[in-house]
Image (spheres, coloured by chain):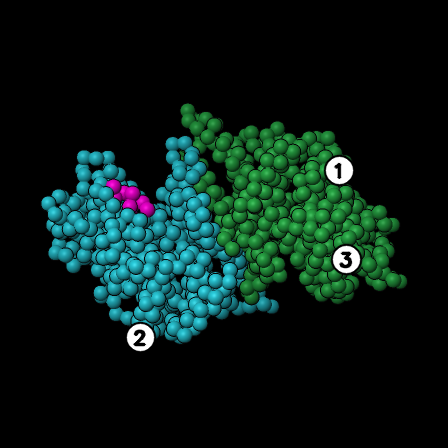
Amino acid sequence: MTDLTAFRAETRAWLEANCPAEMREPTSGFEDACWGGRKWTFQSDAQRVWLERMADKGWTVPEWPREYGGGGLGREEAKVLRQEMGRINARLPLSSFGIWMLGPALLKYGTEAQKQEHLPKIARGEIRWCQGYSEPNAGSDLASLQTRADDAGDHWVVNGQKIWTSYADKADWIFCLVRTDFSAPKHLGISFVLFDMTLPGVSTKPITLISGKSPFCETFFTDVKVSKTQLIGELNRGWDVAKYLLGHEREMIGAMGEVGGGRPLGQVAAESVGLDDGVLADPLLRAQIARLEVDAIAFRLTLERAGDMAKAKQGNPAFASALKYYGSELNKRRHELAMSAGGSDALEWEGERSKDGAAARDWLRTKANSIEGGTSEVQLNIIAKRILDLPGA
Amino acid sequence: MPLLLNDEQAMLRDTARGYLAENGPVAQLRHLRDQRDADGFSRELWKGFAEMGFTGILAPEAFGGLGLGHVEAGLVMEEIGRNLTPSPFLSTALLAVTALVRGGSEAHKAEHLPAIVAGDRLFALAVDEHAKHGPHKTALNAERSGNGFRLNGTKTFVVDGHVADRLIVAARTAGSPGETDGLTLFLVDPKTAGVATERTQMVDSHNAARLAFENVEVDADAVLGEVDGGWGLLEGVLNVGRTAVAAEMTGAGEEAFGRTLSYLKERKQFGKAVGEFQALQHRCAHLYTELEITRSAVLKALQTLDERFDAAAPIVAVAKARAGTTATLAVQEAVQMHGGVGMTDEFDIGFFLKRVRVAQELFGDDAFHADRLAKLGGY
């Protein structure tokens, strides 16, 4: 306990000295974050400095081993770091699919050479990753994917199309599911490969969403030569890697239910509807906000408990589906209420006053939370089958 | 502290689970109800609670107790919830012990704690005066009279009120109903002249009573805590009760869900187990998720009572609100998914529906606690 206390004191002092003031301001929108990568332009000096300092400490990935650019912290220490960052409202130094999704899969399935090659660049935000999973005809039924990788000796030739590839146009590398055996049952002919998005034959086309933004792309592969050294895990066993990674993706999307998205809703509503004797003047809105807050606190504790259970080897891997399901639905609820709390002010789509409709665009973006990474309905199927053991599920 | 049980706690849970399943199953509640039992609980079971140490779970070791914490008390409550076991555990072993330990004089503790631990003395906490919980609304009047006080007023929904050997009564010694200042807790012997007790037969077949106080004289040493300054003590005791009832509802909700799952796997219609229908599977998966999320909040509330008792109010509100809505969903789904048999008195599932309705109301329902959280959040 005293070690942790000392660690907390050191961490607090270090953060105080090293976290720039600008990086303690609440983010104004979903994309107001540092994503890194070869194409990244820092939005401010503070953003760059904050990333560099945290990366030097290994604290962009506090729990990864030091030899791969991590901080080598234990779970309790990492918790302290998160708490201390939360205490001063420090922003995440780096938002990254490499950290949240690929990294854990590489740590589990990658060879030593693959870890050495990729993990440190993820930790420092040098390479930005995207995920090539869904295809036009493989959504909820992901395992029916058709993008093919044909054996050509020391490399594969990849042809096909991915869709809903988040930030593919901004990414440097892709982790991608490809079919390497067309005769095997659909789950047993898939491989998990990595390749550079600048390779000849790779092209991307942004998809404009209802939010007016284009976080997702169509991604096309025409005779792309992918080195066999970039196969993660065994040939034709990519589904295992994919599922493991999906578990992390689900936790990530679920965890969005935890992020406050800036200011507490009660405060936002107080500005638009006013307070009456210390309580919100709109009692029905207040009740909905209060119930959301009850659920959000309980959900945050459940993320914490799930982590504790995993560490104590008491967890069920399918529990990530429960977190993903609840977290994404919670986030949608939160943003519906944020729109109610904001009233007509939140409906302005352009202009300085609304920061170009930031609240509305975020609200629309959350509608994808219960679709991406496996729909809510797919998560419920998984819970019914793998946790509740219901027949025929 | 991780949100997990440690090894000792897991052992206690297993012990309590085995003991309650064997000695306090739903059949016992049914039997007590059918017999119109005068006590409304099994005295033999309570003797067993004393032998197991459950009566002294929170009581300090100096008074013969186990000196354990709220997490441990919550484990017993959860098993009580699973079995719908009627017992004085909540009122006596948790609420009264907390009130005595935190507000009692050394003499109070010496007089009552060992008797509680031995299973020889029962207590009841008398707070509510209206159909909806609201301790600040306390109007029962205690005016100074000679060396002591004279009590006038009424109380309702007093759990174990008709079997208690001592009452802990929230009374107003100053100010007006609606104010948190001016409240005082009194220890009252229900045999004192002027105390009238009416047992109320409740929907869940658990104990409750209405009490009337007419010029009831008590000595100055009947005061627990400070005169006029009883709010903090009362809130502390209530927070223990709220969290304990949340743990009970967690057990009841999970048990109702578990019985429902078993039923869905057995019951066949259209030539297959009804659990094969996706319409039911998704509702079960949703309910499972709700139960797990509630479990986290309840465990955190119990841990917070052990670690930072005076800072527990927000998480207690979350736990009680969540447990209320989740258990309510669980028992409603249980009855619906059991179909016709769920509506029969012969089948036990209806007992869960009834008990959860009462536990929801006890010490504030989900709306009360969501409101409380909003107030604590400044909106």
Residue A61, magenta (yes or no) = no
Does the magenta run of residues contain A238?
yes
* Crowd tier of the residue under label 1, counting other residues whose Cα lies within 10 Å: few below 14, some 14–19, many 20 or above: some
For the record, the magenta segment spans A237-244
Q: Is residue B330 visible?
A: yes
Residue A269 seen anywhere in this rendered image of the structure: no
Left/right of residue B254 with respect to residue A366 in the rendered view = right
Residue B271: percent from left, percent from top: 41, 24
Looking at the rendered image, the disc whose residue lies closer to the viewer, 1 or 3, is 3
Residue found 57% across the figure and 59% down from its top: B314
User: Picture coordinates of residue B80 (x, y %)?
Assistant: 62, 40
Residue type marked 2: Asp
With respect to residue A346, does A217 lie above or below? above
Q: Chain of mark 1?
A: B
Among the chains pictured, the one given cyan colouring is: A
Q: Are marks 1 and 3 on the same chain?
A: yes
Give the residue drawn at x 64%, y 44%: B358
Q: Secondary structure at mark 2?
A: helix
B187 in relation to B86, above or below: below
Q: Which chain is green?
A: B
Please tell me which of labels 1 and 3 falls first in the chain.
1
Task: Give how far apart the Cα atoms at labels 2 and 1 are.
Answer: 74 Å
**Marks 1,3: beta carbons within 8 A:** no
Q: Which residue is mark 1?
A: B39
Identified at 72% across, 61% down, the residue is B230
Q: Are marks 3 and 2 in contact (CB under 8 Å)?
A: no
Relative to A18, B170 lies left or right: right
**Above or below, comparing residue A354 to residue A221 in the picture:** below
The amino acid type, in three-letter code, at marker 1 is Asp
